[in-house]
Amino acid sequence: METLNGCTFDGCLLLDFRADELLSSVTVITEARYPLPGGGKNKGRLRIDLEGIRQLNVLKEAAFDADILSSRGGVAAGKTADANRVYSVGVRPEVRTGYFFELVSDFLELSITCAVCDVSLETVA
């Protein structure tokens, strides 16, 4: 189980994946469990925006298309018939290129080298 900004991804789903038409930017939104000040974890949404894409490697299972299309009105709304579970998400700085991002889920594996990586967490009050 990987962590990113203190978040873990056990029992979390991939909610959205989008790339612009020139494949120069990618946005990934996933559920994530973040640590609470008093201990324990709560579930929120982690958004990763990647810009200045230099290399993009994708391994996509056949079930991904139907799952992500239904998730835009389904998983995000709590409907998880085809759960695209996230196993790991990671970002590390690269000396020459900026950042290396990697995601592994049930239906999608990504590895991306990019110039800019912005990670934000939407927590639940």
Image (cartoon, grey):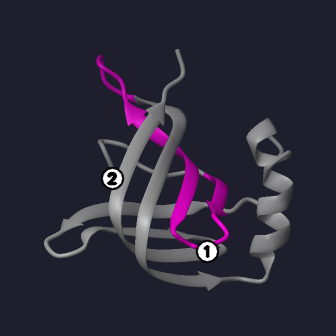
Where does the image place residue 52, in percent across and percent down from the top left?
Answer: 41, 66
Q: Which amino acid does label 2 sit on?
A: Thr
Q: Which amino acid does label 1 sit on?
A: Leu
Where does the image place residue 8, in percent across and percent down from the top left?
Answer: 40, 48
Separation of marks 1 and 2 at Cα, in angstroms: 18 Å
Left or right relative to 55: residue 66: right
Image position of 122 with respect to 85: above or below: above
Residue plotted at (54% across, 62% down) = 26
Magenta span main SS: strand
Image position of 21 with respect to 57: above or below: above
Farthest residue toward the left? 95
**Chain part drawn in magenta:** 13-40
Residue plotted at (49% across, 64% down) = 87
Residue plotted at (57% across, 73% down) = 23
The question of residue 17 being in magenta is answered with yes
SS label for mark 2:
loop
Task: Tell me the quadrant of the picture where the N terminus can be found.
Answer: bottom left
What residue is disc 2 on? 3
Left or right relative to 17: residue 40: left
Task: Give the mark nearest the N terminus, 1 or 2.
Answer: 2
SS label for mark 1:
strand
Nearer to the camera, 97 or 68:
97
Where does the image place residue 11, in percent across and percent down from the top left?
Answer: 57, 50
What residue is disc 1 on? 108
Residue plotted at (52% across, 63% down) = 25
Q: In which quarter of the image is residue 109?
A: bottom right
Left or right relative to 87: residue 7: left
